[in-house]
Amino acid sequence: MEIEKIKTALIEQKNINLKGNLYHKTQLDFAYNNNRLEGSTITPDETACIYDTGTILTSSNKVIVLKDATETKNHFTLFKYMLDTISNPLTEDMIKKYHFILKDGTLTDSEKSWFNVGEYKSKKNFVGSITTSNPKDVSKDMKKLLNWYNKIDKKTVEDIIEFHVKFEYIHPFQDGNGRVGRMIIFRECLVNDIMPFI
């Protein structure tokens, strides 16, 4: 099956760490686009520089937001972790680990005790006019969501999208929900033999 070849290639190429292959291209495109959707100022060239050299080369007048650079670097680590655990079941603990990897070391977030990096939110958050789960209900809502999702034998892209919509309505974390949710989409597409998309 074609998707199985893609999954195998991503896992094998992750371990080789060469430029120009599917893993390298996916890392760059996914990190750039996933962070850009959340307002990151890091460009595609800067994303590649962070991934390839661990540095950032910018124009002389550009100011780099440290949080954006850290989240870009963390996204690379998160993608690698997602592939490393691809055969494990999707659980609350895995989703919390995704959040921890993404947000760890982001000074403005991880230094706030109430921010709960790697744990569910402790303060109410909003997405436009959408009412998200109250902090006290998040654990119950996530258990209910995963229970529903994990009972589906043959998951379709529609099931994965429905999971994502419900996940975003819960909005379990203080910040980083969209990026964690999109990583879950990518993972679940690979797991369920569906062409992943960014």
Image (spheres, helix red, strand yellow):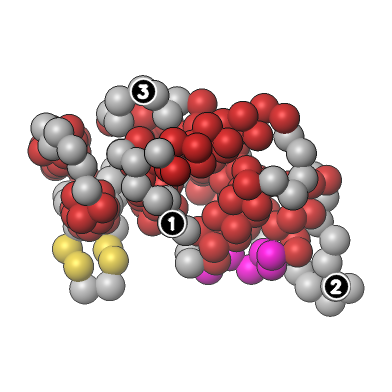
Q: Disc 3 designates what residue?
A: 88
Local SS, label 2 = loop
Asked if residue 107 lies in the magenta stretch, the reply is no
* Direction top: furthest residue: 88
Residue positioned 28% across, 72% down in the render: 128
Residue 45 in view in this figure:
yes
Q: Disc 1 designates what residue?
A: 197
Lateral position of residue 43 relative to residue 145, left or right: right
Asked if residue 40 lies in the magenta stretch, the reply is yes
Depth check, mark 1 against mark 3: the one in front is 1
Q: Earlier in the sequence, mark 3 or mark 2?
A: 2
Q: Dot 1 surroundings within 10 Å: few (below 14), some, or many (20 or more)?
A: few
Check residue 73 in the rendering and tell me which mark sits there, or answer none: none
Mark-to-mark CA distance, 3 and 2: 42 Å
Majority SS type along the magenta span: loop
Mark-to-mark CA distance, 1 and 3: 21 Å
The span picked out in magenta is 39-44
Residue 99 location (% of width, % of height) = 43, 40
Amino acid type of the residue that numbered disc 1 sits on in the rendered structure: Phe
Query: Which of the pair 29/72 is nearer the observer?
Result: 29
Depth check, mark 2 against mark 1: the one in front is 1
Residue positioned 36% across, 23% down in the render: 88
